[in-house]
Amino acid sequence: MVRELAVEEDGVRLDKYLSVRLADLTRSYLQKLLKDGDITVNGGTVKSNYKVRCGDKICVKIPEPVEPEILPEELELDILYEDPDILLVNKPKGMVVHPAAGHASGTLVNGLMAHCRNQLSGINGVLRPGIVHRIDMDTTGVLIVCKNDKAHNQIAEQLKVHSITRKYYAVVHGIIRDDRGTVHAPIGRHPTDRKKMCINEKNGKDAVTHYQVLARYRRFTYIECQLETGRTHQIRVHMASIGHPILGDQVYGPSRCPFAGLQGQTLHAGVLGIRHPETNEYMEFHAPLPEYFQCLLKKLETD
């Protein structure tokens, strides 16, 4: 598609102009198109901070979606809810959401492709079947899957404006004295370890986590966290930043776990509330605490 600028748009950053004119495309996807040379101005490639000028001819080429080489697998899925537009699944501990290096099979997406057949969304240039947001491999709990592009865009917009209800449950090191609190600190890539996130005042993105104490034990605290934003590893980074890393989190907490056999962080996505992409009705879904989490709480109560 080719667009010619109007007078009132003169001097606007290219990425901002495109995000308004092409509202169906995410900003990250527009950045990818710019990087790949699929967006040109007056026949040439430019950067996202280019200031558009009256009379500029902007050409946007949308590549055909690429079919991923992901094989369907008949996996046991704990489905909490399903209709023609969305599916809510309770992800178990140890399951990766999407195939990646070292995890080519056995992922949630492999199971979804077998369960939903061809009824999964595929947008943003690469078919990422149904996935709008993710949770870490060792985090359990409720995750939404979209079956068509309309639902995907609707849910993605709710994530963008932070209107989705997301409540997590965690056990953290130490005793949190205040019954409630908020961590408001930007999160970005760690400057030296690219696999980690950190509080990054210079290059981080705004991040807000509200927490509430549910129970205090001798050395640990059981909390509920409600996300206002959804950055990578947000709860793990935020709680570690105030001196209360999540129990079992060997990336952001102690390298040695005090409970033998505990795999990864003790973090569970318990509640997800959305407006249905078709009816606009508010719906809230609950995933019960996994067995390992319940057993851990009983141990802590008797410690």
Image: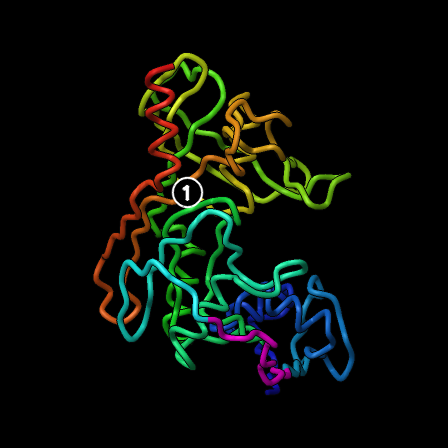
Magenta-colored span: 61-73
Residue 165 against residue 280 in the figure, above or below: above
Q: Is residue 13 left or right of residue 227?
A: right
At a point 51% along the width and 23% down the height, the residue shown is: 244
Residue 66 inside the magenta-drawn segment: yes
Please provide percent x and percent y for residue 184. 50, 32
Foreground of the two, 10 or 161:
161
Camera-side residue of 60 and 143? 143
Circle count: 1
**Front-most of 145 and 111?**
111
Which residue is disc 1 drawn over?
Answer: 228
Q: Amino acid at mark 1?
A: Glu
The N terminus: image quadrant: bottom right
Crowding at mark 1 (Cα within 10 Å: few <14, some 14-19, many 20+)? many
Seen in the picture, residue 256 relative to 288 is either above or below; the reply is above
Q: Is residue 281 magenta?
A: no
- Which corner quadrant of the image does residue 147 belong to? bottom left
